Image (cartoon, grey):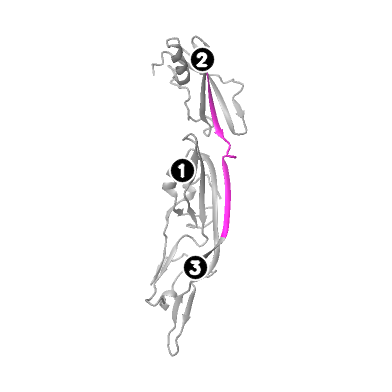
Amino acid sequence: MLPSMGIAIKEDLLYPHAMHITRQAFRIVRKFQVTGLEAYSATKKVVMAATGTDAVTGFQIPQLGASHPDEPSAVVVDIKPQCQGYDCFDTFVTYEWQVYPSNFLESFSASLVERITHYDAAGNLAVVQYTPAGATAAKKKVAALRRLVLSATVTFHFLETANPETLTLQYAGMVNSAAWRNQPPRTWLCLPINGSTQDGIWYRNAYAFAYNPQTWDEYAVFENVDGVVPQDVSATIDTSGATYSGNGWGRFIVYGQVDFNAVFPNIVG
């Protein structure tokens, strides 16, 4: 590109048709007057009118993908120079942001699914015991119970510039380290973040989170070779979350944790 050669750029702040609203998008149009082009050829004048930089202020005609100074969600999608004379062009810069159907959409789905659990509705370990005839002590075993439990997913849709691939690699498979959406830590699991783009700048992203009212922690309990849990083990297991380990048992945080309030500030409870 040739030097600016004394180019001057002035924005027409009184341009009467700055805002356009269509069924598909909002558009903002800015009009710039570009002068000081006499040193350029006819073809180069058009190029400089679309890309030039003011020789005094350093202001450059906004380029494709640049954000509007007052509306960051709107980006440049079109630049149109129009010749007004030998040394003067009017350059119209169009910013646009799509309606999807708004910049935010929330959806929720839930079902009851059958799972095998070792705890009753109150969170107590399901232990059965048996005392053989003539024995002085009972044998105990953790039972496997069939239970319909809540399986819920909440999804949030945003029109934004965040790359879904980057977001997924950072946060998919993480649980909330602090209370989030009025639920305790580790009850929400971030699923892969999906998105699509037409210009490589704006993405229609979908953030999905799976809810587990019992948290996504897992328990491990010591068993004898015959599958029986020793009595002194089963008697000390704490399912409230206040204690995470004991003699013969442990509650394990199996997913990485991150503060969803900080990394997903647009999602509120």
245 inside magenta stretch: no
The label on residue 89 is: 2
Instruction: Note whether residue 182 is visible.
Output: no
Sequence-wise first label, 1 or 3: 3
Instruction: Depth check: give the residue in front, 261 or 162.
Output: 162
Identified at 52% across, 45% down, the residue is: 206
Q: Label 1 sits on what residue type?
A: Pro
The label on residue 164 is: 1
Instruction: Note whether residue 140 is visible.
Output: yes
97 inside magenta stretch: yes
Residue matched to label 3: 117
Q: Give SS at disc 3.
A: strand
Q: Position of residue 143 (x, y in %)?
A: 48, 74
Q: Specify the segment rendered in magenta.
A: 91-111
Sequence-wise first label, 2 or 3: 2
Q: Position of residue 104 (x, y in %)?
A: 57, 42
Sequence-wise first label, 2 or 1: 2
Q: Is residue 110 left or right of residue 249?
A: right
Identified at 56% across, 21% down, the residue is: 13
Instruction: Depth check: give the residue in front, 260 or 116.
Output: 116
Q: Up-down: is 88 above or below 149? A: above
